[in-house]
């Protein structure tokens, strides 16, 4: 019988299923659908999986993983079939090969966000350096050296404190041949969560800074 998995059924084996799902070939002709083939969502998904594996798989965390499948409109579900074990079932949105890795990334990121330990001060940082310290104290892995190195990330040393939190900009370059692009992030002092604003690794520096500034509606604070 094939059913949606429950927390009680989950074992650490489920992360091997995620690994296989992420690493499967997309089966597309890049020239027909893509302007370049940087596999940024694949890299994002593998980084999220690496973080997920860093935590023990407790019954509480198993439930957090089930809850995380509600992300990405609930289109990625963990399936259990008696005698066969776990699998992932993805409901296609527009075009499966260009979105299935993003779905895995979003679910795993939601899982890691839910289970990571937090010590939250609620303080609004006055600089990007203080933002890093507050995030790390809350258990965030966002600024870990390994995570930054994986994406060749850099942090623009300006923050905008305003509506909904503190906004800042990162840049990522996946290899020596790809263009460095920019992503807007929002830090929530009340939860210490860091989330994207807009699309991942899609903007120019100027466009990203404008989005961060207008999202906060506040003057910049320099590190």
Image: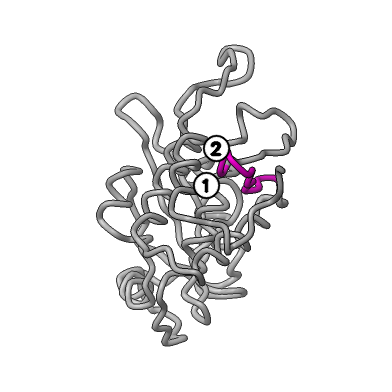
Looking at the image, which residue is at 40% across and 31% down? 179
The N terminus lies in quadrant: top right
State the SS at label 1: helix
Tag 2 residue = 101
Q: Where in the figure is residue 16, as x and y percent of width and height?
A: 44, 42
Judge by depth and name the residue closer to the eye, 154 or 44.
44
**Viewer-proximal residue among 205 and 32:** 32
Between 56 and 206, the residue placed more toward the observer is: 56
Spot occupied by residue 58 in the image (x, y as percentages of width and height): 44, 68
| Direction from residue 63 to residue 204 in the image, left or right | left
* Quarter residue 46 falls in: top left
Magenta stretch contains residue 38: no
Picture disc at residue 105: 1
Q: Which residue sits furthest front?
A: 83
Q: Is residue 33 above or below residue 127?
A: above
Check contact, mark 1 vs mark 2: CB within 8 A: yes
Q: Main secondary structure of the magenta part?
A: strand
Instruction: Write the residue at 46% across / 45% down.
Output: 182
Q: Residue at x 56, y 23 (%)?
A: 26
Q: Quadrant of the C terminus?
A: bottom left
Q: Quadrant of residue 90?
A: top right
State the separation of the CA atoms marked 1 and 2.
Answer: 6 Å
- Which range of residues does the magenta coloring cover? 75-86
- As displayed, is residue 174 above or below residue 25? below
């Amino acid at each position: 019988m094939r059913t949606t998995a429950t927390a009680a059924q989950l074992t650490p084996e489920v992360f091997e299923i995620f690994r296989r799902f992420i690493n499967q070939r997309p089966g597309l002709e890049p020239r027909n659908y893509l302007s370049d083939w940087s596999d940024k969502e694949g890299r994002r998904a593998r980084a999220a999986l690496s973080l997920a594996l860093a935590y023990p798989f407790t019954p509480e965390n198993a439930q957090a993983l089930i809850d995380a499948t509600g992300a990405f409109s609930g289109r990625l579900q963990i399936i259990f079939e008696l005698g066969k074990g776990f699998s992932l079932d993805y409901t296609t949105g527009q075009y499966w090969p260009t979105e299935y890795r993003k779905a895995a990334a979003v679910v795993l990121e939601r899982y890691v966000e839910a289970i990571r330990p937090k010590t939250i001060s609620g303080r609004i940082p006055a600089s990007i350096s203080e933002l890093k310290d507050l995030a790390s104290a809350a258990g965030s892995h966002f600024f870990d050296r390994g995570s930054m190195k994986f994406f060749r990330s850099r942090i623009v040393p300006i923050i905008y404190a305003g509506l909904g939190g503190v906004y800042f900009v990162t840049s990522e370059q996946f290899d020596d041949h790809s263009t460095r692009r920019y992503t807007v992030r929002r830090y929530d002092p009340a939860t210490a969560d860091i989330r994207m604003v807009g699309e991942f690794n899609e903007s120019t520096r100027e466009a990203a800074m404008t989005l961060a500034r207008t999202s906060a509606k506040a003057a910049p604070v320099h590190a």
